[in-house]
Image (cartoon, grey):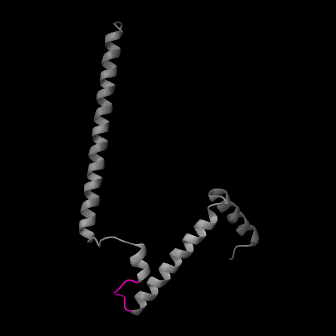
Amino acid sequence: MTPGWQELLVVGLIVVALFGWKRLPDMARSLGRSARVFKSEVDEMKKDGKTPSDAAQSTVKGDIVDDQAARRVEDAEAEARVAEARAKEAEARAAEARADADRLRSDPSL
């Protein structure tokens, strides 16, 4: 089933409402550039599949990271986030205990 003109109009209005008129040309230009780079990479892979095209080298710079090293880095970052969350939780519990102790000291009826 293909969308009718009403559905396309609704989708268009939602896109305009989300992003605004001024950002749409920039988004379309960026989408076009991305499509050109993707197409050139696909063509290059079809030719020999070994060397990236000039478009890839000019737009994406970086080192090749082996998968295991990347996983180890991600695991270490995740462990650091867990440790930080645990430290914040312990700090919050300590602050709550101090507040309870202060409340007990200030109210002799308890």
- Looking at the image, residue 44 sits to the left or right of residue 31; the answer is left
Magenta-drawn stretch contains 52: yes
Q: Residue at x 74, y 73 (%)?
A: 4
Residue 103 position, x and y percent, is 35, 15
In which quadrant of the rendered image does the N terminus lie? Answer: bottom right
Q: Residue at x 67, y 57 (%)?
A: 17
Q: Is residue 64 above or below residue 72?
A: below
Q: Which quadrant would residue 65 be assigned to in this image?
A: bottom left
- Looking at the image, residue 25 sits to the left or right of residue 53; the answer is right
Q: Residue at the right extreme?
A: 6
Q: Which quadrant would residue 7 be assigned to in this image?
A: bottom right
- Looking at the image, residue 39 sits to the left or right of residue 49; the answer is right
Residue 42 position, x and y percent, is 45, 85
Residue 78 position, x and y percent, is 29, 53
Q: Residue at x 60, y 70 (%)?
A: 28
Most frequent secondary structure within the magenta stretch: loop
Q: Which quadrant would residue 102 be assigned to in this image?
A: top left
Q: Is residue 46 above or below residue 93?
A: below
Q: Residue at x 41, y 82 (%)?
A: 54
Most foreground residue, 95 or 52: 52
In which quadrant of the rendered image does the C terminus lie? Answer: top left
Q: Residue at the bottom extreme?
A: 47
Magenta-drawn stretch contains 33: no
Q: Residue at the top extreme?
A: 108
Q: Which residues are magenta?
A: 48-53
Residue 11 position, x and y percent, is 68, 65
